[in-house]
Amino acid sequence: MTIPVHKYDVVIVGAGGAGLRAALQVSEAGLKTAVLSKVFPTRSHTVAAQGGVAASLGNVTEDNWHWHMYDTVKGSDWLGDQDAIEFMVKKANEVVVELEHFGMPFDRLDSGKIYQRPFGGHSQNYGEKPVNRSCAAADRTGHAMLHAMYQRNVKANTQFFVEWMALDLIRDEDGDVLGVTAMEMETGEVHIFHAKATIFATGGAGRIYYSSTNAFINTGDGVGMAARAGIPLEDMEFWQFHPTGVAGAGVLITEGVRGEGGILRNASGERFMERYAPNLKDLASRDVVSRSMVTEINEGRGCGPDKDHVLLDITHLSPETIMKRLPGIREISIQFAGVDPIKAPIPVVPTCHYQMGGIPTNYKGQVIVPKGDEKSVPVGGFYAAGECACASVHGANRLGTNSLLDLLVFGKSSGESVVEDLKGNPRAHKPLPANAADVSLARIARLDNQKNGESVHEVRLAMQRTMQKHAGVFRFNDLLKAGVEEIKKVAERAKTTEIKDKSKVWNTARTEALELDNLIEVAKATMISAEARKESRGAHVRDDALDTAETPAGRDDKNWLKHTLWYSEGNRLDYKPVNLQPMSADVESIALAKRTY
Amino acid sequence: MSANTKRTVQFKIYRYDPDKDNAPYMQDITVELEQSDKKLLDALVRLKVKDDSLAFRRSCREGVCGSDAMNVNGKNRLACLTDVDELPQPIVLRPLPGLPVVRDLIVDMTQFFKQYHSIKPYLINNDPPPERERLQSPEEREELNGLYECILCACCSTSCPSFWWNPDKFVGPAGLLAAYRFIADTRDQATNERLDNLEDPYRLFRCHTIMNCVDVCPKGLNPTKAIGKIKEMMVRRAV
Ligand SMILES: Cc1cc2nc3c(=O)[nH]c(=O)nc-3n(C[C@H](O)[C@H](O)[C@H](O)COP(=O)(O)OP(=O)(O)OC[C@H]3O[C@@H](n4cnc5c(N)ncnc54)[C@H](O)[C@@H]3O)c2cc1C
Ligand code: SF4
Ligand code: SF4
Ligand code: FES
């Protein structure tokens, strides 16, 4: 069988915020670029982002990048790399202003400048009080941003392959990346995209958990493809549970609601965050708020007949504020919680939301792996940005609004690096290995021929329940240990899933089966990395990490101030140091300290 | 409340797989829903457990991505924003009308996006960009409300008779709404060019104010009003 081959300078997989920003950079530089996406670009999950994008514009309250950097490092529980963080916060104003120039309909202040609201963990003067740093378009910031960037790409004539699903990464004997295999969903045909540079911008994998704010399509495809191709995954034990998912439905209620004055209350109506975070209260960092909520629920102060959630109250805000600043939230609340937040509080629970770890990169978006004695050697031709990548700016816990910023900054820098790297090295395409498509074809043939297997639905559900039970908001030594065995069993089951639908045309059963392979890689990486990390840090909190003078709140900097690297082959773990050194002399390293809000 | 119990729901669904079917047919199928299945999309996902060959698009499941528009009991809607218990049964599901069917509930949206692209859906401003953001007053920004929120689901255009008859010539409500979104933006400098682009017996003027589009938009947007404003501007420009 001959496989059609498409030759491009650059292939970008993913057309969410990160992919579209990268695409602009390379298209406008005149490189021949193909952007692949499983869904029409504006259907990517960036569209669901609500609250805003961080930049220290200082339009409402005084602000600067030093404070933003401090908040981000502290939010990351010092696991973030300070060079990448410095790079990101310094670029924030530039990329947000650029977005405005692209046509993004930000809300406005009376001064005509971009509207900014407070957000969790973002502060003035190194933790003193909340700051208005989140640049917002009502509570539809992601939608406004994604559409504006898609539109700009239409202007730039970017070439999209819509509803094409990338299946596997192509690497040659030197380990260089030469593109991907991809399936056209309408025909079921597999093609090769042969490129000098490949950028992954495939988003997160929140669907490894049973309860998630993530879209159906967030199945960690890029992360899974990288892992299968021998690239290690970084810090996959760190998952953010967002404090306010609609109880039962999982749909997100943005932190912007608390930024506008919303208050969390327990069954007795108490504003319990005052006890856990006296300074920032409801606007403390997400991991802190989520744990406080779960503690309230576990100690019997939850709301509702099953005492299984808490309430998010904005009934004290004026209906005008709610209609103007939070119209989407009101819609979601009515649709999915059955309450109008103008009149009654919204039932919420912590819900899996964001993957802090991912494909390891530097601040240029180059994918980096250990090689010999060196810990960070770029992989030829391979770049990653956005939620699928780990730069690492979010460390052990991401601050709200820093992800949309991450997409813009690292989407752009990965594009710039590609332009740079191809200019400095105008090599022709390296020849494709003869077996470039074999792995993908075998995966599809396996599905075509499988008999007596379990359904994809069953295995996926088993995975999601295992993750939810064994690697949730609070983690327990014995549950993690059992979880490792459980998830390995589920991974075995995933090898023999059976689909009934054998059609070539728009076979969504097949797509879901192929996605499951990626989810499984992510789930294994998460469980195994989490079991191994014997401390509490950011979003990873375990029962047996004790609060001592040497290990405040269970954080053990002596032994665990390091990044995890998980390899799919043999479930091997490795570690690399955290970069505590900023990029420039403009700022000193933010010194380790106990994290309180 | 009925939403909180297990219940059986009856469907009549348009099925067509060009790989094996000679012609489309309507499939009768029932499914037992779990307590937590509230939306039509939840029911379809449940159905797919039973019959994995049912093809439909979906992603966000919260009404922002625009993937799962379909014709439900004769009306175009998003499955994820439709309460399943409110629908009379059997629930009749068909692909969006007026576009070629690829398979089952999946239509070919090429024509729809072509029209969207034809209005130059991007900000045109040829001044050198300033150092900081361009200024816009809250009132000027408010002009974009009711326009920028479009999720390109195509519920409107595929319920518009004028679009059915002339999908290649009439821009359709979604595209025209987008055209007005840029005309209404104080930062955009191409109003005249945009009006020229629509000055044509078909592109704009095929709209006969039938209002189907307003009726079905799941985001509560009003393409007819936007179209009216464009027509007004044309008239004003002519005198
Ligand atoms: C409900 C919600 C609200 C949020 N709100 C905020 C917020 O207010 N502020 C903030 O900073 N962050 C927010 N976040 C986080 C942020 O939105 C995401 O981290 C970010 O949008 C991810 O963008 P991305 O470009 O990396 O990926 P995505 O936008 O998820 O895009 C992934 C792209 O990859 C494509 N793709 C994936 N797999 C394949 C494949 N195999 N083949 C081809 N294409 C593929 C998809 O089609 C898609 O185009 C929110 C997240 C959620 C879930
Ligand atoms: S009002 Fe115009 S655009 Fe809307 S449905 Fe009627 S003819 Fe179509
Ligand atoms: S105007 Fe409404 S119905 Fe039409 S595409 Fe946009 S969101 Fe959908
Ligand atoms: S699934 Fe996104 S709009 Fe319904």
Image: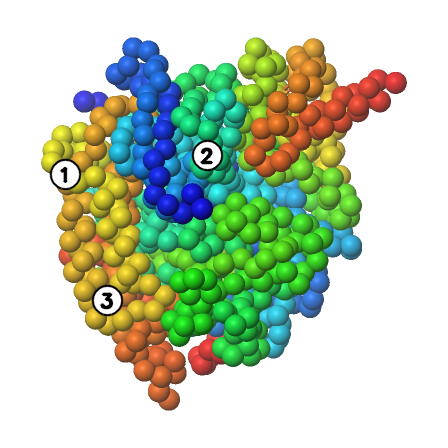
Rendered image: mark on residue A453: 1
Dot 1 alpha-carbon crowd within 10 angstroms: few under 14, some 14 to 19, many 20 or more: some
Residue B88 visible in rendering: yes
Dot 3 alpha-carbon crowd within 10 angstroms: few under 14, some 14 to 19, many 20 or more: many
Mark 2 element type: helix
Please tell me which residue is depicted at 35% across the width and 18% down the height of the picture: B26
Residue A489 screen position, x and y as percent:
15, 53
Q: Quadrant of residue A315?
A: bottom right
Do discs 3 and 2 belong to a common subunit? no
Residue underneath mark 2? B79
Please tell me which residue is depicted at 62% across the width and 27% down the height of the picture: B215
Proximity of marks 3 and 1: CB atoms separated by less than 8 Å: no
Residue underneath mark 3? A480
Q: Relative to A527, does residue A597 appear above or below in the rendering?
A: below
Residue A556 screen position, x and y as percent:
33, 79
Q: Relative to A121, does residue B120 appear above or below in the rendering?
A: above
Proximity of marks 3 and 2: CB atoms separated by less than 8 Å: no
**Ligand 3 falls in quadrant:** top right
Report the Cα–Cα distance between label 3 and label 1. Answer: 28 Å
Please tell me which residue is depicted at 37% across the width and 23% down the height of the picture: B13
Do discs 3 and 1 belong to a common subunit? yes
Q: Relative to A578, does residue B102 appear above or below in the rendering?
A: above
Earlier-in-chain disc, 3 versus 1: 1
Direction from residue B129 to residue A181 in the image, left or right: left
